[in-house]
Amino acid sequence: MTTTNWTPAQPIVSIRDLHKSFGDLEVLKGISLDVMKGEVICVIGPSGSGKSTLIRCINALNPINSGSILVEGQEVHDPALDKLALRKKVGMVFQQYNLFPHKTALQNVMMAPLKVLKRPRDEVEKHARELMNRVNLQGKEDSYPGELSGGQQQRVAIARSLAMNPDVMLFDEVTAALDPETVKEVLLAIKDLAQSGMTCILVTHEMGFAREVADHIYFTDRGVIVEHGPPATFFTEAKDPRTQEFLSQIL
């Protein structure tokens, strides 16, 4: 297994010349980027530009064709990698909440630490209740997903990911399926997380949010990073015509 003695002075996620195809369609065409511990990175771009594929590759949900992805010095696409060990380090929240409908919100949050980490039930339950409070869902512990709004379900999904104590959190268009009034509560939960020092990589089309929380923004189009920079300059001084056109359509 490829691994190095990683220290926080190095990028917690380091991607080099990443290529990914689905059949004949090349979706990622040589992506490289670094994320430092505690950084919040937003990846933006038009639909079909490879954003979701990129973060699914970081979590080894999609195999890659070539290139390298290191998480804490460990090569994610090493055939000998223990994917379970990787997913303890890297949490992921999807556009669809993927909650178990027959389990309560609290049971959904408790499930992985009990089954995967084999932690004691009382310890897991205490932590799960703390996480429910953290995402502002106190009082909803015994509700089933079907009794919760989309925004509440998405916050349960965030708490469920956090229950594994990951070092990095990936968010894939987590507000895309939500009603406008519930988007805000989910973004607030993510903002709280980002401000607490969690390393976050977000694929998002919420530009105001990206401007507010991101340390660095990457704009992708047709499988390449076209332009990147801190929000202060990215939104006002974009150089590439593709970036300018994209921003003019959405800002």
Image (tube, rainbow, N blue to C red):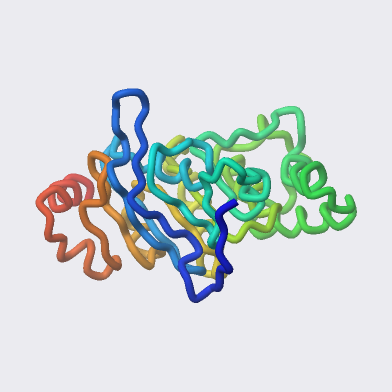
Q: Is residue 235 above or below residue 221?
A: below
Q: Residue furthest top?
A: 23
Q: Judge from the rendering whether residue 102 lies leftward or rightward of residue 179; answer left or right.
A: right
Question: Image point 70% across, 29% down: which residue?
Answer: 101
Q: Residue 105: x, y in percent? A: 72, 41
Q: Judge from the rendering whether residue 144 lies leftward or rightward of residue 203; answer left or right.
A: right
Frontmost residue, 115 versus 196:
115
Q: Judge from the rendering whether residue 26 lies leftward or rightward of residue 121; answer left or right.
A: left
Question: Image point 74% across, 59% down: which residue?
Answer: 130
Q: Residue 100: x, y in percent? A: 70, 31
Question: Image point 18% across, 47% down: which residue?
Answer: 246
Q: Judge from the rendering whether residue 46 lies leftward or rightward of residue 84; answer left or right.
A: left
The answer to which quarter of the image holds residue 201 is: bottom left
Q: Residue 177: x, y in percent? A: 45, 35
Q: Is residue 189 visible?
A: no
Q: Is residue 90 above or below residue 230?
A: above
The answer to which quarter of the image holds residue 227 is: bottom left
Q: Is residue 113 visible?
A: yes
Question: Image point 49% across, 56% down: which residue?
Answer: 70
Q: Is residue 184 above or below residue 5?
A: above
Q: Is residue 118 above or below residue 96?
A: below
